[in-house]
Image (cartoon, rainbow, N blue to C red):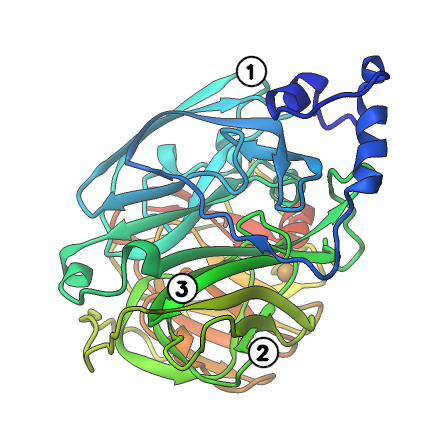
């Protein structure tokens, strides 16, 4: 039996029939699993996570048995028994209220990646709670429409807990977005993309190597080899890279371009085209994809060119869908001007240090004046990818030199995570104008974060 806490009771709750050797717990299921393995030629219906309004009574981190599409019962760590957790839908001005319950056998805390909240609600490593404890969250949504996500953030355990399944999407809407009449309902599809590995019983496995946790197979919304039926129309795909250590190079199998309409910080000012999108861990992208040319029964795949994976199989129903073309102006992006020279420089050294230091939860690394625009410079000599993520404010990416040497269309507008590849220097303009208090900056390669590539700062 694994120590990850999946119990026979979970199995029974899922309605798994245990055989004559039921008393042995997992063994009967192991036998079953061998017969009902994952068939390489099958595609399983993509799971669309349930949604939750801003008020959710309980958000529980719990081990559970889930079905990833192939019918094999698999242990995972989940929010409220679901993989991924429920998708939050809130509007600017709403108040989010929930109570986190720690049903794991180790400390946890949940961070709302991309949400601008005060220290008490940020779910950083200083706020972790012990097994059996609860943590109340209550915060207003003070930012524009965007796709964010939530995941655990306990000191040194984030990578493990995310790899075992804990994550979910968080969508914010506002009137600026409403006015665009973007594809909605069945035509708006959240895609939480990650990789995963399994133990011999089919349970989620966390086995990081020195370059981080790389799963053997892709998992989209917790579904293995997902297929999704599409009408002949335009879809809005809202993609989160929820992997620990894998950068996805997204492309469509028919070579057509995506229409990029948004990223971490919400809508871009105008749509951009691109046949490939490089999405680092923690980054999000908002895409329009046109399936009008697809005849009934025909497929287009969303791929990762780097891994050589087909992530989602979109199969046409042949039915007429939505004709949509975005207007030339999507949103107004407030200008931000700041210093031409860096205010601070952060070097991402090795796999565990920023400016030569490993993270110490009790050390305050620097202070930032409230309301002042600074220019932060992120540099690395190697061991990338280092997706740099900042809590407490969004930023504008202003330059990349060395390495890839350019900025990409999906890096326009507002961001909270920017991908730093080997030998790159990236400058961003950032201003903390929502809350004073304590936040962190860290690498979103979760094993780097866990080993210490993180700093504490205070907005004063
Ligand atoms: Cu997505 Cu500090 O994390
Ligand atoms: Cu890193």
* Label drawn at residue 424: 2
- Judging from the image, what secondary structure is the residue with disc 3 in? strand
Q: Nearer the viewer, residue 350 or 44?
A: 44
Q: Residue at x 66, y 69 (%)?
A: 309
Category of crowding for the residue at label 3, using alpha-carbon neighbours closer than 10 angstroms: few (below 14), some (14–19), many (at least 20): some
Task: Indicate the quadrant containing the N terminus: top left, top right, bottom left or bottom right.
Answer: top right
Residue 284 visible here: no
The residue that mark 1 highlights is 132
The residue that mark 3 highlights is 237
Say how many tags the image has. 3
- Judging from the image, what secondary structure is the residue with disc 1 in? loop
Q: Position of residue 438 (x, y in %)?
A: 41, 41
Q: Is residue 356 left or right of residue 373?
A: right
Q: Residue at x 45, y 36 (%)?
A: 123
Q: Position of residue 301 (x, y in %)?
A: 55, 72
- The image quadrant of residue 100 is top left
Q: Which sits earlier in the primary sequence, circle 1 or circle 2?
A: 1
Q: Is residue 159 left or right of residue 312?
A: right
Q: Which sits earlier in the primary sequence, circle 3 or circle 2?
A: 3
């Amino acid at each position: 039996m694994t120590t990850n806490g999946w119990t026979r009771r979970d199995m029974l709750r899922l309605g798994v029939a245990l055989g004559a050797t039921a008393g042995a717990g997992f063994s009967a299921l192991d036998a079953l699993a061998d017969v009902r393995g994952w068939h390489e030629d099958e595609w399983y219906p993509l799971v669309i996570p349930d949604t939750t309004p801003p008020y959710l009574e309980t958000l529980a981190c719990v081990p559970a048995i889930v079905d990833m599409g192939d019918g094999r019962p698999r242990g995972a760590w989940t929010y409220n028994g679901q993989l991924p957790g429920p998708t939050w839908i809130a509007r600017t001005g709403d108040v989010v209220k929930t109570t986190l319950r720690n049903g794991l056998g180790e400390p946890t805390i949940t961070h709302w990646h991309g949400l601008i909240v005060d220290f008490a609600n940020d779910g950083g490593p200083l706020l972790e709670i012990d097994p059996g404890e609860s943590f109340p969250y209550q915060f207003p949504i003070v930012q524009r429409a965007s796709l964010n996500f939530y995941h655990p953030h306990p000191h040194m355990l984030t990578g493990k807990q995310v790899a075992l399944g804990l994550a979910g999407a968080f969508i914010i809407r506002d009137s600026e977005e409403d006015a665009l009449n973007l594809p909605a309902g069945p035509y708006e599809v959240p895609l939480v993309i990650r990789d995963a590995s399994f133990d011999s019983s089919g349970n989620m496995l966390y086995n990081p190597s020195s370059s981080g946790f790389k799963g053997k197979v892709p998992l989209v919304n917790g579904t293995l080899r997902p297929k999704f039926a599409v009408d002949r129309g335009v879809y809005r795909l809202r993609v989160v890279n929820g992997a620990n250590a894998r950068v996805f190079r997204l492309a469509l199998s028919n070579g057509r371009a995506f229409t990029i309409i948004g990223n971490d910080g919400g809508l871009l000012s105008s749509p951009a085209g691109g046949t490939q999108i490089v999405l680092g861990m923690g980054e999000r992208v908002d895409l329009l994809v046109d399936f009008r040319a697809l005849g009934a029964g025909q497929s287009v795949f969303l791929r990762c060119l780097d891994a050589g994976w087909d992530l989602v199989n979109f199969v046409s129903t042949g039915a007429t869908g939505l004709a949509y073309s975005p207007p030339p102006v999507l949103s107004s992006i407030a200008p931000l001007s700041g210093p031409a020279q860096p205010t601070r420089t952060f070097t991402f050294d090795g796999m565990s240090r920023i400016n030569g230091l490993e993270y110490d939860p009790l050390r305050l690394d620097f202070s930032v004046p409230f309301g002042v625009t600074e220019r932060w410079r992120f540099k690395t000599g190697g061991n990338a990818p280092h997706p740099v993520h900042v809590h407490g404010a969004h930023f504008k990416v202003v330059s990349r030199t060395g390495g890839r040497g350019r900025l990409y269309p999906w890096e326009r507008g507002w961001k909270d995570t920017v991908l730093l590849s080997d030998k790159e220097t990236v400058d961003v303009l950032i201003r903390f104008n929502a809350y004073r208090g304590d936040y962190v900056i860290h690498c979103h390669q979760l094993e780097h974060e866990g080993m210490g590539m993180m700093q504490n700062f205070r907005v004063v």
